[in-house]
Image (cartoon, grey):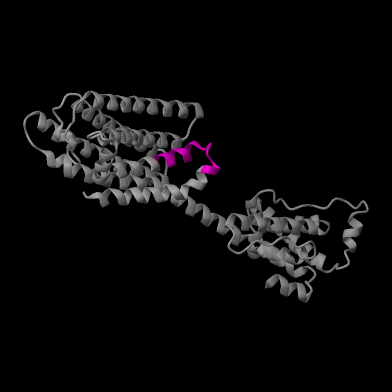
């Protein structure tokens, strides 16, 4: 593998991290977001510092032959710990349990990192090796132990991550399960990676030579596993974001009949500030809900409980479930009230409502899904259509305004 084989995934990880940075700055207290950014940072650093050109440059700048070896091994340990911490925080659970498990893994791999540095300092590696240090120094005291330690720590992290992902995948469904299985598949590559490295090292201990397994096969396995795992981490998050966006757009679209029904009423009051068409869909939904509630407020004196009661009975008689029947009844009351308000341009009913008249009913629209039900009932319910036909017609100008 040449330098580009390391630098391309390093740059890709760095780009994703740059995209995540604004969210990290806004939500620094979110442990899951911190874990994701830590994983991306460490993955990018591992690929960058494991590239042979970087290894040579670090050795040259520091003036310490092969100092890149413990640096890369420590970064691998940190990456292993960050993967485990990310899975723990992603899975959730009691905060104290999550923090305790995270600290244990961090402390364990922190201790391994310290041991790697100490062993390198105690050993002697005078000949620079850019690709085959593991096998070249397989019989060197202290360097040998350093190599075995980092391989063992990397293997433990791979097996632990696979077990955690597999257990969690058995408890969930959908994209999250698919992502966990992909992550497990990616970390399974740690096993053949470590096996290839160990086989080459053990062969050196016994006077053999299987250096190609360590120098050429193992890096390919590590790169493939990292990329597969990255897909597993990204898939559920990306699909969740797409799903959330689709749900929000669907809510925005489904609120359209109710919003259009109330436009003539809302336009008679103070016109709300309009947002730009490129604004986030969440903001557009909020604006649409606000317009609807403003229209409801203007219609309040015109709501008729008798209209709602008759519509509810008709909806139940036609086979609607109670929740849907209530939505149809509210929708019928709203559409009749819109026409009553249009037939009262001088606002006589509004004036009389403020002189001690009986309280008027209010549609049950405390939650967004209630508004959606009401909106769908406006466009789909035959009960609402019948109530609309029997109500006073809208003035021609208001009708064209509402249907534009």
Image quadrant of residue 162? top left
Write the residue at 50% across / 43% down: 24
> In the image, is residue 30 part of the stretch drawn in magenta?
yes
Residue 203, given in percent of the width and then of the height, sits at 10, 33
> In the image, is residue 361 part of the stretch drawn in magenta?
no
Residue 177, given in percent of the width and then of the height, sits at 39, 44
Q: Is residue 303 left or right of residue 205?
A: right
Secondary structure predominantly adopted by residues drawn in magenta: helix
Look at the picture and state if 212 lies above or below 205: below
Write the residue at 68% across / 62% down: 274
Instruction: Confirm whether residue 383 shows in the render.
Output: no
Please, which residue is most extreme toward the bottom here? 396
Quarter holding the C terminus is: bottom right
Q: Is residue 194 left or right of residue 402?
A: left
Q: Is residue 65 left or right of residue 344?
A: left
The part of the chain drawn in magenta is 25-39
Look at the picture and state if 57 lies above or below 134: below
Residue 388, given in percent of the width and then of the height, sits at 73, 67
Please, which residue is most extreme toward the right here? 355
Residues 266 and 113: in front is 113
Residues 154 and 284: in front is 154
């Amino acid at each position: 593998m040449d330098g580009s084989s390391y630098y391309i995934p390093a740059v890709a990880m760095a780009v994703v991290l740059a995209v995540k940075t604004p969210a990290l700055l806004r939500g620094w207290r979110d442990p899951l977001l911190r874990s994701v950014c830590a994983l991306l940072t460490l993955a990018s650093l591992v690929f960058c510092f494991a590239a042979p050109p970087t290894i040579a440059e670090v050795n040259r700048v520091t003036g310490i032959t092969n100092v890149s070896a413990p640096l890369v091994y420590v970064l691998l340990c940190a990456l292993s710990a960050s993967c485990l911490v990310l899975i723990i925080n992603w899975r959730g659970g009691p905060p104290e349990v999550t923090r305790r498990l995270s600290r244990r893994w961090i402390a364990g791999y922190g201790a391994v990192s310290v041991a790697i540095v100490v062993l390198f300092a105690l050993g002697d590696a005078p000949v620079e090796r850019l690709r085959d240090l593991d096998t070249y120094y397989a019989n060197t005291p202290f360097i040998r132990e350093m190599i075995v330690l980092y391989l063992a720590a990397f293997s433990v992290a791979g097996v632990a991550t696979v077990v955690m992902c597999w257990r969690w995948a058995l408890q969930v469904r959908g994209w999250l399960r698919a992502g966990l299985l992909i992550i497990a598949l990616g970390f399974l590559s740690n096993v053949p990676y470590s096996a290839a490295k160990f086989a080459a090292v053990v062969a050196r201990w016994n006077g053999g030579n299987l250096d190609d397994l360590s120098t050429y096969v193992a890096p390919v396995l590590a790169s493939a596993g990292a990329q597969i795992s990255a897909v597993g981490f990204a898939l559920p998050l990306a699909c969740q974001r797409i799903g959330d966006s689709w749900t929000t757009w669907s809510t925005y679209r489904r609120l359209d009949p109710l919003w259009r029904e109330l436009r003539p009423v809302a336009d008679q009051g103070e016109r709300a500030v309009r947002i730009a068409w490129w604004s986030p869909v969440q903001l557009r939904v909020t604006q649409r809900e606000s317009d609807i509630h403003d229209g409801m407020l203007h219609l309040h004196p015109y709501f008729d409980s008798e209209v709602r009661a008759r519509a509810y009975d008709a909806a139940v008689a036609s086979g609607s479930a109670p929740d849907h029947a209530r939505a149809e009844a509210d929708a019928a009351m709203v559409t009749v009230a819109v026409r009553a308000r249009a037939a009262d341009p001088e606002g006589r009913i509004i004036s009389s409502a403020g002189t001690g008249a009986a309280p008027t009913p209010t549609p049950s629209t405390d939650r967004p899904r209630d508004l959606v039900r009401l909106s769908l009932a406006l466009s789909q319910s035959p009960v609402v259509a019948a109530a609309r036909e029997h109500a006073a017609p809208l003035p021609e100008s208001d009708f064209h305004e509402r249907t534009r």
